[in-house]
Image: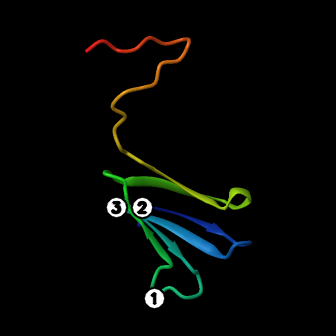
Amino acid sequence: MRCFHYNATLKLLVTGCSHIVYVWNPVVTKIYLAKLEGHKNLVVDVRIFEHFNLVISISKDEVKQKPNTPNTRSEER
């Protein structure tokens, strides 16, 4: 486990392990409630946003292309 976040109101624990995020009931720890896959690299942080019913995970996945904004130009290839 590399990172975790606990929400006492929702009674949920979220952990980041390798490239997978697990959602747990902190009382029953023998099996996870959900397994969230999709990251290609290590998960470095997880957060529970109670008011949005949302879990966000951040990994070391590479950004291939940044979007154009008024203050930046696109990269030439």
Q: Is residue 77 left or right of residue 10?
A: left
**Residue placed at 49% from the left, 13% from the top?**
72
The span from disc 3 to disc 2 (Cα, nearest Å) is: 7 Å
Category of crowding for the residue at label 1, using alpha-carbon neighbours closer than 10 angstroms: few (below 14), some (14–19), many (at least 20): few
Q: What number of labels is visible?
A: 3
Q: Picture coordinates of residue 66 (x, y %)?
A: 42, 26
Q: Picture coordinates of residue 46 (x, y %)?
A: 52, 57
The span from disc 2 to disc 1 (Cα, nearest Å) is: 19 Å
Q: Which residue is mark 2?
A: 2
Q: From this view, report whether residue 77 is shown above or below residue 58.
A: above
Q: Closer to the observer: label 2 or label 1?
A: 1
Q: Which residue is mark 3?
A: 18
**Disc 1, SS:** loop
Screen quadrant of the C terminus? top left
Q: Earlier in the sequence, mark 3 or mark 1?
A: 3
Category of crowding for the residue at label 3, using alpha-carbon neighbours closer than 10 angstroms: few (below 14), some (14–19), many (at least 20): some
The span from disc 3 to disc 1 (Cα, nearest Å) is: 19 Å
Q: Closer to the observer: label 3 or label 2?
A: 3
Give the residue type at disc 3: Ser
Q: From this view, report whether residue 37 is shown above or below residue 73.
A: below
Q: Residue furthest left?
A: 77
Category of crowding for the residue at label 2, using alpha-carbon neighbours closer than 10 angstroms: few (below 14), some (14–19), many (at least 20): few
**Residue placed at 35% from the left, 15% from the top?**
75
Give the residue type at disc 2: Arg
Give the residue type at disc 1: Lys
Tell me the number on the disc at residue 30.
1
